[in-house]
Amino acid sequence: MLALTLARPHSTPGPLMRDFESYYAAGQTWSAHGDPYSAAIWKFEQTIPGVQAARGELLPFVGPPAFLPVWAFFSLLPFSVAAVLWGAILLGSAVAVLVATLRSTNALSIGALLAGACIFVGFGPFTSDLALGQAALLSFAACVGATLWFDRSGLAGCVWSFFSAVQPNIAVALLSQIGKRRTWMPLLGAVVFFLALSLSARGLHGLLSYFSDLIVHGQAERFGLIQITPAAIGYGFGLPAIAAQFIGSLATVTAAILALAVLRLPYVKQLWKLAILCTLLPFAIPFFHEHDFVVVLLAGLLCALLAENRTWTLAVTGTLLCAVDWLGLAQRPDGLLQSFLLAIALLLGLFAIAEQPARRLLLPSGVLLFLLGAGILAQHHQAPVWPDAMHGVTAMSAPVAQIWHGELERTGQFARDPFWAAMRLLTLFGTTLLAWASISVAQQRDQLEIS
């Protein structure tokens, strides 16, 4: 779950698409009338090819109950076939985001598509999503689809909105659209459909317990290494838990205030509002992994296409900082060369899609040099990887969130190391640059017809 990405040469042994493992097993558990939000899921996870059953590497399922029938459908197929099918859906989601963004900015061409392909391939959160089989990519694409379709078809907007909820912490980005009158009915319809399917899948008690499960699960890994949030990073730097949590709460409030301010600007187009809110999500949501940063790619693409001068340079620098999987580099320093080459591919793609003067690449190129230095330092500060570093065997008798917390603890995920914290902070710094650039360009481009 934590380290299988395309950006590293030595992947963690395990099943194809590690996170898809929990979706698939949840579908099996639900079909067998078991509780996929409990340790009962392990009965099916341990049968998936690649899972080391003797170690007890349970991977919890925290997806919404409304999508359990979808995962049950996938579980009818052999795991390898289901993983390939799911991977094709995720790849199609990425293509849809790229094409939709280029069309919305009147930049769709063969050259732009090729440059966009380089950008996606070089963007670490995207490669992580694809390699892990993470639903965050589909949720992100659905947010973009809903935003572009609200004005054209209420039904299409409703469908896209519903599928964005496959990953709730990403679906929050659709709050960027609530200020527009035509979005209310599609969003309301999606919520009603979501609740109806959830009730059908688990009943009222199951639906209510799901929300409590989310809270408990969030608490179980709040300060873990895999969390790229202000609170987790503060904890990693050595702050007491209460101080780190205060920083997280302060970041949430600040991000919410900024989001409200942006949403009140009448001349900022809807796609820009979505892009800006996506850059604020990592600060507002207390549960954000590296692969969830795929949402900031929308702001990166829009700024690369439409920003000018210094703003373009800062936006590209921010995109590159978000693109590098700094945490993954700390976990696997031997992936430095591959990470470096992918970063170059992304930088060249951003340059080609924007046709900016070559001198604009000077500051972003500095990130590449910084990447080399960080990779060398990472050789002496290697971070643990789940489940590779897990010691002992997991007992499956406790609540699933407690089991998961124990696995992370035995893997060393709660160890404090300023270097690991600093590496994760680079991602948030890049997101901050993108947020500033997006707000700046969105206001300058009020005359541009972007849906």
Image: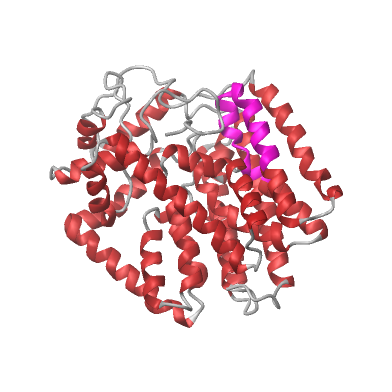
Q: Is residue 342 magenta?
A: yes
Q: Provide the residue span drawn in magenta.
A: 320-345
Q: Residue at x 83, y 50 (%)?
A: 360
**Which residue is farthest bottom?**
181
Q: Position of residue 220 (x, y in %)?
A: 38, 38
Vertical comparison of 387 with 400: above or below: above
Vertical comparison of 420 with 162: above or below: above
Q: Residue at x 54, y 43 (%)?
A: 125
**Pick the front one: 49 or 235:** 49
**Pick the front one: 151 or 285:** 151
The answer, for residue 37, to whether it is visible in the render is no
Q: Residue at x 21, y 33 (%)?
A: 44
Q: Is residue 297 magenta?
A: no
Q: Position of residue 319 (x, y in %)?
A: 67, 48
Q: Position of residue 212 (x, y in %)?
A: 30, 51
The answer, for residue 193, to whether it is visible in the render is yes
Which is the main secondary structure of the residues drawn in magenta?
helix
